[in-house]
Image (cartoon, grey):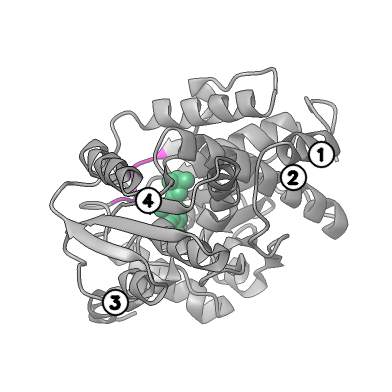
Amino acid sequence: MNQENNIVTRLGLCQRIEQLPQVDIGHYPTPLEPCPRLSEALGGPRIYIKREDCSGVAFGGNKIRQLTFTIGEAIHQNADTIVHGATTQSNHCRQAAAVAAQLGLKCYLRLSRDHKSLVQGNLLLDHLAGADVELVDAPFGPELDLVKYALADKLRSDGLRPYVIAAPQSTALAAVAFSWCIAEIHKQQQEMGIEADLIYAGSAGGTQAGLILGSKALGMKLQPVGVAPIYWEDKIDRIRQAANNAAKLLNLDFQIADDEISNTDAYIGQAYGVLTPECIQALKIVAQMEGIFLDPVYTSKAFAGLIDHIRKGKISSDQTVIFLHTGGTPALFAYNQELTDVPI
Ligand SMILES: Cc1ncc(COP(=O)(O)O)c(C=O)c1O
């Protein structure tokens, strides 16, 4: 394995990560599984799936790794209450509610009312985990952040010690988390005797930032490719800033530049959370070839991108690709109608 370009060793990266406040909540390392039937069905590269959907808490997902550090920071600051918010089918909020329950913290979720406001999937799990859930009319983004901060002020005046999960700190800590995921992959690759060329992830934020940071820090051949689930005009800025803020938190003396970030908007379709025929097809192929369920909002669109790149010859059959399964599967149950509308 080529280690000539590494900036730190794997042990060195892990030691820097260990310096940050964290809670031990997930089941790590998550498996890195070969998918021979899927590789054959797509007539292409060797495909492995990194199973962040098996990260152990509350149906798993990429946010458990991220919450390891955000909730770690909350506890370090002596918080007793978590305040979070996003869309109604937010995986992040569901995982935050479950982790808060596990650690005996109170959890308040303020969710933007949208086309998936029925009590199903993630929203159902938020309630079951005992979170204080309220649907609000502020759109996801800066306006919803204001709602979260106003609530935190009120809780503080009631004598609680709230910690608000919000960008940019949460995104930087996601990048720390996924540099740790890369260290895990680095070790797994050594043990399995493989060296992947590419890692695909459904991300337009901290997750991809961490993949880029980690693979650069360790001098790996592995090139991260992000497939965005949402249109953000400032997407590249967000990813670069998250990676560089994480580099600072880890005392890594290098920066990520824009031309090191590969991220496509080509598989979003009409909008965030609106299914495309290609994502439904991708979801069914992976389920039917490997018995692995993708989610309707992130991983199925990312996998549709991977399939398209294979079909267009951007990835050759002698290459090795890791697909990062970032979880999100509870949302399947909120999309039952759309998922059964399109036969394949
Ligand atoms: C299942 C799933 N995959 C991917 C992502 C994207 O993560 P990031 O915001 O770090 O890009 C999310 C974020 O909510 C998610 O829930």
Q: Are marks 3 and 4 in contact (CB under 8 Å)?
A: no
- Residue furthest to the left in view is 137
**Residue 22 x %, y %:** 65, 47
Identify which residue, 286 or 125, lies in the foreground: 125
First in residue order: circle 3 vs circle 1: 1
Tell me how far mark 1 sits from mark 4, CA to CA.
34 Å
First in residue order: circle 1 vs circle 4: 1
Kindly identify which numbered label has been placed on residue 10. 1
Where is mark 3, residue-wise?
120
Where is mark 4, residue-wise?
83
Q: Are marks 2 and 1 in contact (CB under 8 Å)?
A: yes
First in residue order: circle 2 vs circle 3: 3
**Residue 57 x %, y %:** 57, 68
**Magenta segment, which residues?**
264-268
Residue at image location 31% in from the left, 70% down from the top:
123
**Residue 180 x %, y %:** 69, 45
